[in-house]
Image (spheres, grey):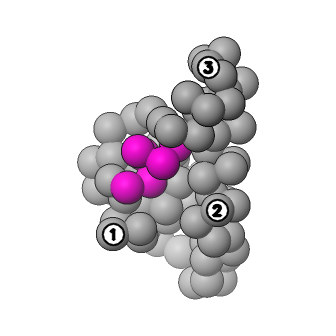
């Protein structure tokens, strides 16, 4: 996953944030439009982890177990989950 440097990745899911990924009506923020809508989080940790593990598994061809482990490691570095 991307390096979880504040401001470059969503601090909820760890995916890179581009200008078009910011929630509607918000300025540059720490969370993408898939994690936050109208200043409220739309998914709990389990849902975010599943979505991230799905992407890791699909993109890397890793086993589900390895994808879930990588997703958990990524989430543990992000501001929302600390």
Q: Nearer the N terminus, badge 1 or badge 3?
A: 3
- Point out the tag, 2 or 1, that comes first from the N-terminus: 2
Magenta stretch, main secondary structure class: helix
- The relative height of residue 52 versus residue 57 in the rendered view (above or below) is below
* Highlighted range, magenta: 71-76
- Residue 82: image tag: 1
Q: Earlier in the sequence, mark 3 or mark 2?
A: 2
In depth, the one of 45 and 63 nearer the eye is 63
Q: Residue at x 63, y 71 (%)?
A: 44
Q: For the residue carrying disc 2, how many other residues have a C-alpha within 10 Å: few (<14), some (14-19), or many (20+)? A: few
Residue 32 appearing in the image: yes
Q: Secondary structure at mark 1?
A: loop
Do the residues bearing badges 1 and 3 touch, measured as CB atoms within 8 Å? Answer: no
Kindly tell me whether residue 22 is visible in this rendering: no
Check disc 2 and report its element: helix, strand or loop: helix
User: Which type of secondary structure does the marked residue at label 3 adopt?
Assistant: loop
Q: Position of residue 77 (x, y in %)?
A: 33, 53
Query: Could you tell me residue 49's position as x and y percent?
Result: 60, 53
Q: Out of 28 and 59, give the one closest to the viewer.
A: 59
Query: Which residue is identified by label 3?
Result: 62
Q: Which mark is residue 46?
A: 2
- Residue extending furthest front? 65
- Look at 44% across and 53% down and name the residue there: 75
Q: Is residue 75 magenta?
A: yes
Query: In which quadrant of the rendered image does the C terminus lie?
Result: bottom left
């Amino acid at each position: 996953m991307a390096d979880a440097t504040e401001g470059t990745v969503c601090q909820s899911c760890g995916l890179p944030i581009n200008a078009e990924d910011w929630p509607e009506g918000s300025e540059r923020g720490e969370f993408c439009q898939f994690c936050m809508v109208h200043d409220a989080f739309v998914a709990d940790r389990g849902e975010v982890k599943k979505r991230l593990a799905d992407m890791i598994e699909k993109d890397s061809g890793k086993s589900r177990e390895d994808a879930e482990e990588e997703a958990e490691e990524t989430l543990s570095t992000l501001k929302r989950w600390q």
